[in-house]
Amino acid sequence: MSNLSKSEFEIIEILASGAMGEISLSMHEKTGQKRILKSLIPKLNNDKQAILALQSESKILKRLKHPNIVEYFGNIHDKGKISIVMEYITMDNGKPLNLEQLLKQRGTIDLKNTKKIISQVCDAIGYMHKKNILHKDIKAANILMSVKGGIKIIDFGLSDTFEYFDSGTHYIPTTQLNWRTGTYNFFPPPEIQNDSNWTPQSDVFQVGVLTHLMITGRYPILNDRLHNYISLDIDHVKCFVDTAINAAPQKRFINMKNMKKVLLSL
């Protein structure tokens, strides 16, 4: 893992601060390139579980190299504080924009552009699954719009590694972090009850929810029950989403490659 020096970076501004992490925009002085620094909020700097979670995220990022995944540059260790250094993602106009912000601007995304975006998500998540990594937090806010219509997936704070057992028909998480967070509207039904139920089909579910949100501007949930709001006028899209968000994991798309193939046929 690359160790970088804090002195190499000048903090420009703090972009976001949440319950666990703080995101800062910085300038790498040697290259003049802007970089994102992700660190723990000050009150968690000595929290062993929070530190373990951030270390786990950096280890996972180190294993990933894909055009639709944020690029990782290394870690900064400074007086016991860890910061993950990543690329600063912008569109062609040089400004950052995530899919959640785009949906707030437009309300919905047309089918053509939904397919373009979701197919790239499938490529990235499928690549992760081949490396036995689950994302577990696929949502609009974690999809950044990039140059030339591309996208990049960010935020691997909930990501987990897994292993196959029973001849590849079952999975078991291997990171074993005691850190339970996430976005309710994107949680598959079985996984709400038990996080150890998470499998590659759970990520499929989240991509299905994301597709539904882009097409309709709504989450496929009503009174704690799954509900597909996609019009019968585009029944083929409705069937695609129904398969992805099926309450039974074994009835969802078998993998991201299969999901993308069906998507592009719509």
Image (tube, rainbow, N blue to C red):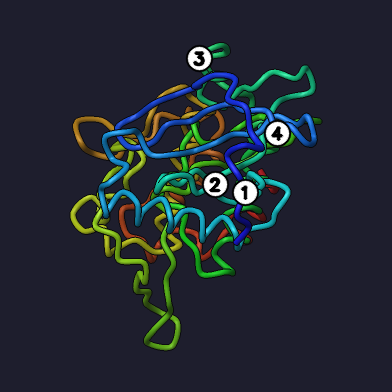
Do the residues under discs 1 and 4 have CB atoms within 8 angstroms? no
In the figure, is residue 207 to the left or right of 263? left
Gap in Å between the C-alphas at discs 1 and 4? 11 Å
Q: Amino acid at mark 4?
A: His
Residue at the disc numbered 4: 28
Please provide percent x and percent y for residue 114: 63, 33
Q: Amino acid at mark 3?
A: Lys
Q: Does dot 3 land on a helix, a strand or a loop?
A: helix
| Residue pictured at 43% horizontal, 60% vertical | 201
Q: Which badge, 3 or 4, comes first in the chain's sequence?
A: 4
In terms of depth relative to the viewer, which is nearer, 146 or 229? 146
Picture quadrant where residue 33 is located: top right
Residue at the disc numbered 2: 76
Of the two numbered discs 3 and 4 in the rendering, the one whose residue sits closer to the viewer: 4
Gap in Å between the C-alphas at discs 3 and 1? 37 Å
Q: Which badge, 3 or 2, comes first in the chain's sequence?
A: 2
Residue at the disc numbered 1: 4
Q: Amino acid at mark 1?
A: Leu
Picture quadrant where residue 202 is located: bottom left
Residue at the disc numbered 3: 104
In the figure, is residue 177 to the left or right of 254? left
Of the two numbered discs 3 and 2 in the rendering, the one whose residue sits closer to the viewer: 2
Q: Does dot 4 land on a helix, a strand or a loop?
A: strand
Q: Does dot 2 land on a helix, a strand or a loop?
A: strand
In this view, 259 is above or below 105? below
Do the residues under discs 3 and 4 have CB atoms within 8 angstroms? no
In the figure, is residue 242 to the left or right of 33? left
